[in-house]
Image (cartoon, rainbow, N blue to C red):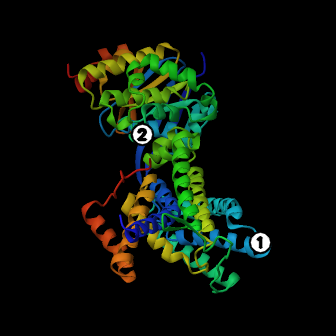
């Protein structure tokens, strides 16, 4: 079997004395969409932070593309080919849409492809092209999420991490965001998605992990988990 | 318009230009890092002394030594930020006040040790020269400083808006965590920003050297004025320093002409006081670097 693009081995993360993640094992293979579901406060964002480099695991290892990247800070992990759409989009509100996107290709390797990347992003999100000269802060919630995704794509990553992309969006926009993730994945990009919207994320993903109280309590093919009684009862409210 | 009023306004604008020239760097450093640099005046002092010594030993004109001052101050600022101020970034504001106040004391006192407390000045052929237009006096050296202020404001704006590093500086000022996600080494950006702020401040010290008194203890006074100018114009907003400087300069000049010279200093603080009550973000301030 091929090597996973991203692999977490027994990752423990603590904030001061409180352990947030307990022995996380997780694998993401090239070109799949993998989702991590779980309730608020389960440690989903911490999980992504420990991969991207904001939190250094105190134990265990993070392996990306065959290279151990445990504890490498975010300004360096992006250079290795992974990028994140942070929770709440966090676009640069005082910068134009175009400048936001250009920031996405700040690293030297992606700066060389800036023009092509911009075309690619504008293809995905024609709306961003229309609003190119507007400040990030003037965009609607849905547009900001598009901008944050576009900005992430500008670095030409091989792995895209998404932290609650549907949070706070109107239902119609939620559908749109998930459709976009599928489209992006179809271009060959690998996606690790952290979501509270369990229904949609199981629908678009191939495999899923269930994170509760900092532990992986279940994992498997998304379509199997959708049929799982426990998942149905606790997350899908069926 | 009568000549006295016109002259007062011209004096005010030229004075304001001087204020703007040496305040822009203060605004930049605050806007990006949230550091109120209490050693700001020392950067002016170092710029002025660079020109003074090059004039004293090599008879080099201050306008020709200005680029040297810029270069030296950039290096100084870069190193100070990288190895000293970066240690308190992210700590409560009071830490950076204490640290930069300590820097102020250290730099000023080392300068006294090296150069004594003597007052010095550079007397060039144009030091006291005026252009007379329609019966109004325009001192050349101040006019040059005014033009430098315009150029610095424009240059800084251009750099921030149009260059890769400038964009990274703005991104860091707005959201340093997300800037890191974009691959920005924010500690290096901070060092570059402080270097840049120090360079333009050193430049101002250099171009002011033909008409100000140069001494190791000159700094503090300038720090206070720069603070007022930047609060008035809007902290962190580049054209704010220019507008703040001009408003303050004209107000002081009018007060000195029609009231008396003593009142003109008080006017500064009255304006600052009123501003903080009615519009704390400043005339043009938006609360972020742009």
Q: Residue at x 61, y 62 (%)?
A: B203
* Gap between marks 1 and 2 measured at Cα: 49 Å
Evaluate whether residue A199 shows in this view. no
Relative to A91, say whether B110 is above or below. Answer: below
Q: Report the front residue among B75 and B150.
A: B150
Q: Which mark is residue B156?
A: none
Q: Pointer 1 and pointer 2: residues touching (CB < 8 Å)?
A: no
In-front residue for pair A208/B191: B191
Q: Residue at x 32, y 27 (%)?
A: A142
Give the residue pinned by disc 1: B59
Q: Which chain is home to disc 2?
A: A
Q: Residue furthest right?
A: B58
Residue A91, horizontal then vertical, whole percent: 40, 36
Give the image quarter of residue B70.
bottom right
- Vertical placement of B200 versus A47: above or below? below
State the residue in front, A42 or A204. A204
Which label is found at residue A92? 2
Q: Residues within 10 Å of mark 1 (few under 14, many from 20)?
A: few
Residue found at the far left of this picture: A238
Query: Within 10 angstroms of label 2, few (less than 14), some, or many (20 or more) residues?
Result: many
B123 sits left or right of A74 in the view: right
Disc 1, SS: loop
Q: Position of residue A224 (x, y in %)?
A: 36, 14
């Amino acid at each position: 079997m091929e090597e996973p693009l991203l692999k977490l081995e027994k990752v423990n993360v603590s904030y001061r004395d409180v352990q947030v993640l307990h022995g996380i094992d997780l694998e993401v293979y090239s070109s799949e969409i993998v989702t991590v579901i779980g309730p608020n406060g389960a440690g989903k964002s911490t999980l992504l932070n420990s991969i991207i480099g904001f939190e250094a695991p105190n134990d265990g290892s993070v392996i990306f593309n065959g290279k151990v990247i445990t504890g490498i800070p975010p300004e360096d992990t992006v250079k290795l080919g992974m990028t994140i759409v942070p929770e709440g989009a966090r676009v640069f509100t005082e910068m134009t849409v175009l400048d936001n996107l250009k920031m996405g290709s700040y690293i030297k390797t992606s700066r060389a492809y800036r023009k092509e990347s911009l075309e690619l992003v504008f293809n995905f999100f024609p709306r961003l092209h229309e609003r190119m000269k507007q400040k990030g802060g003037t965009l609607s919630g849905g547009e900001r999420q598009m901008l944050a995704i576009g900005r992430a794509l500008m670095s030409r990553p091989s792995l895209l991490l998404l932290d609650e992309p549907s949070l706070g969006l109107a239902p119609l926009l939620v559908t749109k965001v998930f459709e976009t993730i599928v489209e992006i994945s179809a271009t060959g990009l690998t996606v690790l998605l952290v979501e509270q919207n369990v229904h949609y994320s199981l629908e678009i993903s191939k495999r899923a992990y269930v994170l509760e109280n900092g532990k992986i309590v279940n994992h498997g093919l998304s379509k199997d988990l959708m049929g799982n009684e426990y998942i149905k009862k606790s997350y899908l409210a069926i | 318009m009568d000549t006295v009023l016109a002259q007062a306004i011209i004096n005010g604008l030229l004075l304001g230009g001087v204020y703007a020239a040496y305040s822009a760097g203060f605004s930049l450093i605050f806007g990006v890092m949230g550091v109120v640099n209490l050693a700001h005046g020392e950067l002016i002092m170092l710029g002025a002394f660079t020109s003074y010594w090059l004039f004293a030993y090599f008879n080099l004109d201050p306008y020709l030594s200005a680029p040297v001052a810029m270069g030296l101050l950039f290096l100084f600022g870069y190193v100070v930020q990288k190895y000293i101020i970066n240690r308190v970034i992210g700590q409560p504001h009071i830490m950076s006040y204490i640290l930069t106040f300590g820097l102020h004391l250290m730099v000023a006192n080392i300068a006294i040790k090296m150069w004594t407390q003597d007052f010095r000045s550079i007397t060039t052929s144009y030091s006291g020269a005026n252009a007379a237009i329609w019966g109004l006096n325009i001192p050349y050296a101040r006019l040059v400083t005014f033009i430098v202020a315009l150029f610095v404001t424009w240059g800084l704006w251009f750099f921030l808006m149009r260059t890769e590093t400038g964009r990274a500086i703005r991104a860091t000022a707005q959201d340093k965590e997300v800037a890191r996600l974009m691959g920005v080494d924010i500690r290096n950006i901070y060092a570059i920003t402080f270097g840049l702020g120090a360079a333009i401040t050193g430049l101002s010290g250099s171009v002011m050297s033909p008409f100000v008194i140069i001494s190791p203890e000159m700094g503090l006074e300038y720090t206070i004025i720069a603070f007022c100018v930047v609060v008035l114009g809007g902290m962190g907003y580049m054209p704010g320093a220019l507008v703040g400087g001009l408003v303050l300069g004209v107000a002081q000049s009018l007060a000195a002409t029609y009231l008396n010279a003593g009142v003109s200093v008080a006017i500064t603080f009255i304006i600052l006081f009123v501003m903080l009550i009615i519009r704390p973000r400043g005339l043009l301030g938006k609360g972020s670097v742009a």
